[in-house]
Image (cartoon, rainbow, N blue to C red):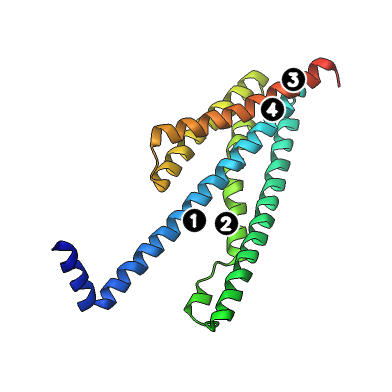
Amino acid sequence: MAVNDTKLADAENPVVAMKCDSDDVDLAGRANWLRAAVLGANDGLVSTASLMLGVSAVKHDVRAMVVSGFAGLLAGACSMAIGEYVSVCSQRDVELAQLEHDGRRGGDEERDLPSPVQAAAASALAFSVGALLPLLAAGFIVGYRMRVAVVVAVATMALAAFGCVGAVLGRAPVARSCARVMVGGLAAMGVTFGLMRLFRASGI
């Protein structure tokens, strides 16, 4: 009976029903954008922290560690932006071809298509935000051991935060998502640091 009443209400108020559907789509779209931003920041954090720790395993100089991290930030942000731009352009071309085939070019659906430039900028910005965290953590500490410990600690806390936000946006179990993100990030940093220590030990 409740289902029939809902259907009757939707039939009597089609504008309200369409507005609710539109709001649901907008909220879902925003959640997807936020989740993509969190993933981009997580990529920036893990890749930059791993690069910095790998360089520090060979050379203890703070300048080498920070410069390598900054280079990783620039390279990663550019790579993310270009990759996202190409991906969204390809998606947009397919959807435009479908609209052309259906005779619906120039309408609201075409205007609602994602912008490649906006997607590229958002991807680069998200990566840069994540990459800045280990850079800021290491830039003001002179002692080698303390610097490495602070980078790992900051990266761990940031990974936990990113995992929580991603879990909430994706409606996944928070504890399991945080643990998965933290273990994956720490494993990447540990493997990079360990393998680069072999270069130092072998004198390469």
Neighbourhood count class around disc 4 (C-alpha, 10 Å): few under 14, some 14–19, many 20 upward: many
Which residue is denoted by mark 3 in the rendering? 197
Which numbered disc, 3 or 1, marks the residue that appears first in the sequence? 1
Q: Quadrant of the C terminus?
A: top right
Count how many numbered circles sit on residues in the image.
Answer: 4
Which residue is denoted by mark 1 in the rendering? 33
Res 59 visible: no
| SS of the residue under disc 3 | helix
Q: Are marks 3 and 4 in contact (CB under 8 Å)?
A: no
- The correct choice, above or below, for 49 with respect to 88 in the image is above
User: What kind of residue is marked 2?
Assistant: Ala
Q: Position of residue 170 (x, y in %)?
A: 42, 47
Task: Write the residue at 38% across / 45% down.
Answer: 171
Which residue is denoted by mark 4 in the rendering? 192
Left or right, 115 with reference to 56:
left
| SS of the residue under disc 2 | helix
Which label belongs to residue 122?
Answer: 2
